[in-house]
Amino acid sequence: MNEITISTTLQVYDSINELPEEVQQLMNSAIEARNNAYAPYSKFNVGAALSLDNNEVVIGSNQENASYPSGLCAERTAVYYAGAKYPNAKILKMAITASSQKQDTNTPIPPCGACRQSIAEYEIKQSLPIEIYFMGAAGKVIKSDSLANLLPLLFDNSVL
Ligand code: THU
């Protein structure tokens, strides 16, 4: 029996103000998207913003449904929107922010597993890492240099 060790290095910024100007703007777009989330059931608003290599910014927010599983997360709303509108563009950066209508969320809120799998599809398709920044409503921002860093041993199309 052998063991393997998987490690990930992430960067932690103290606040949005510490981010490069361009990323602050992207996070502000994510905050705007978050404020327009449709989350009447969970009261948990999530916003995502993508910067593309064609200089466009695409946003998404979570969209809930009375039939709960029919809703969709902010990150997938954004990447599917980008894939539909700009099928040949590469995603360079993704900013994610979440806030609860019930309590403070001042710690970074990472994307859920299903969203990581969906983002991975685009990172593999474009052969270019996607920088991912995520935060709560305030406080620290975590940066990952790629989606792959957040999803070790991912399932991909190489086995299909
Ligand atoms: N949600 C997201 O939008 N992104 C995530 O990565 C995790 C969860 C949404 C789904 C649902 O509308 C609400 O947050 C509570 O789970």
Image (cartoon, rainbow, N blue to C red):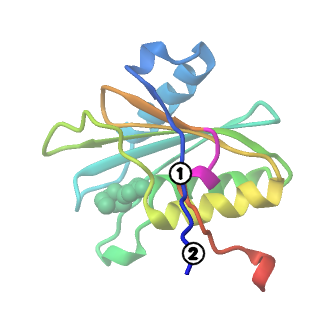
Disc 1 secondary structure class: loop
Judge left or right: residue 53 versus residue 102.
right
Residue 7's place in the image compared with 51, above or below, is below
Dot 1 corresponds to which residue? 7
Graded by Cα atoms within 10 Å as few (under 14), some (14 to 19) or many (20 or more), the crowding at tag 2 reads few
Residue pictured at 41% horizontal, 59% vertical: 63
Quadrant position of the C terminus in the picture: bottom right
* Quarter assignment of residue 66: bottom left
Q: Nearer the viewer, mark 2 or mark 1?
A: 2
Quadrant position of the N terminus in the picture: bottom right
Camera-nearest residue between 2 and 45: 2
Camera-nearest residue between 17 and 7: 7
- The answer to whether residue 84 is visible is no
Q: Is residue 146 magenta?
A: yes
Residue 37 drawn at (x, y percent)? 38, 48
Residue pictured at 41% horizontal, 48% vertical: 110
Bounds of the magenta span?
A: 145-149
Q: CB of mark 2 within 8 Å of CB of mark 1?
A: no
What secondary structure is the magenta-colored segment mainly?
Answer: loop
Q: Residue furthest front?
A: 1
Residue 46's place in the image compared with 151, above or below, is above
Camera-nearest residue between 142 and 54: 142
Dot 2 corresponds to which residue? 2
